[in-house]
Amino acid sequence: MGNIFAVTNQKGGVGKTTTAVNLAASLAESGKKVLLIDLDPQGNASTGCGVDKSAITTSSYDVIMAEAKAIDAIVRPEELSFDVMPTNTDLTAAEVQLLDVKLREHRLRIALESTREKYDFILIDCPPSLSMLTVNALVASKGVIIPIQCEYYALEGLSSLLKTIERVKQRANPALEVTGLIRTMFDARNNLANQVSRQLINHFEKKVFHSIIPRNVRLAESPSHGVPVISYDRTSRGSVAYMAMASEFMRREKNN
Ligand SMILES: Nc1ncnc2c1ncn2[C@@H]1O[C@H](COP(=O)(O)OP(=O)(O)OP(=O)(O)O)[C@@H](O)[C@H]1O
Ligand SMILES: [Mg+2]
């Protein structure tokens, strides 16, 4: 479990996928061996990494349902310097099918046992729900990275996410920790964003990454080219911000 991190927040559209893809790319840029797992049936991380979803033969769905080995579902998309375990909408069915299987919350953890040691870091992009898929990610992980968009409702869902993390920690994965909260799509000119940001720091203190991801159009554009922002426009503010986050993340992990 030592190197697996879930990127999660049940609130939709807060920058989970953007963070998962670009943190993976930035860690790879720093010479780390990285695997990005797409665990969201929407498959946004797969598309953002240039994987053609209609052409996927083996996906994270097959892995979580124990119908394929993790290694057989992993691809290295052209132009990328990290591996991807893609998905497609099949994964929607897993949610229901998992209800009937043994050790249903542990499927991903078990599936990754033999693959884990091949990577320095494995990042899991989670769906916007506290579903069985997200619980599988939490049970498999050492740490949780929580993207937060600093707006009025940002803190509301956070307490149920933290409760879920606490429950998983007590029941299934005592090692689980919140690695950090990352402020995304940040607009420093916005008073409310600054206010919410201060609240986050007051409440979560050191758990809040110093790095801040600004709102940056290059970050929004790069998925349509099927590459992380670092390959699309490496000098953009978005690219620089995710490189800074990756350095901070590695520093934190070294000290842990
Ligand atoms: N820092 C940013 N600057 C500009 N646009 C951004 C930024 N981060 C994310 N976006 C855009 O905001 C939208 C939502 O981001 P993203 O898909 O990463 O969120 P998500 O939390 O994964 O969403 P979902 O809950 O649907 O999985 C996307 O269109 C994305 O390109
Ligand atoms: Mg997403």
Image (cartoon, grey):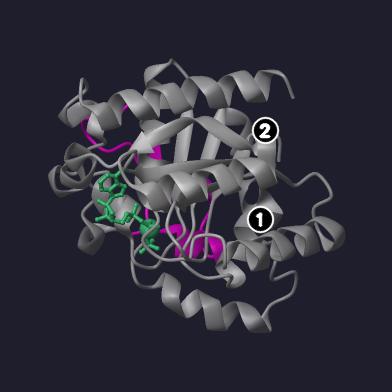
- Residue 117: horizontal and vertical position, in percent? 63, 31
Query: What secondary structure is found at the residue carrying circle 1?
Result: helix
Is 117 rendered above or below residue 18? above
In the image shown, does 69 or 161 lie closer to the viewer? 161
Disc 1 marks which residue?
A: 138
Q: Are there few (<14), some (14-19), or many (20+) residues within 10 Å of tag 2?
A: few
Q: Amino acid at mark 1?
A: Leu
Disc 2 marks which residue?
A: 206
Please report the bounds of the magenta region as a residue range.
57-86
Ligand 2 appears in which quadrant? bottom left
109 sits left or right of 50 in the view: right
Q: Is residue 58 visible?
A: no
| Gap in angstroms between the C-alphas marked 1 and 2 | 21 Å
In the image shown, does 116 or 4 lie closer to the viewer? 4
- Residue 57: horizontal and vertical position, in percent? 32, 59
Q: Amino acid at mark 2?
A: Lys
158 in magenta:
no
- Residue 86: horizontal and vertical position, in percent? 37, 53
| Quarter holding residue 115 | top right
Q: Are there few (<14), some (14-19), or many (20+) residues within 10 Å of tag 1?
A: many
Query: What secondary structure is found at the residue carrying circle 2?
Result: helix
43 sits left or right of 5 in the view: left
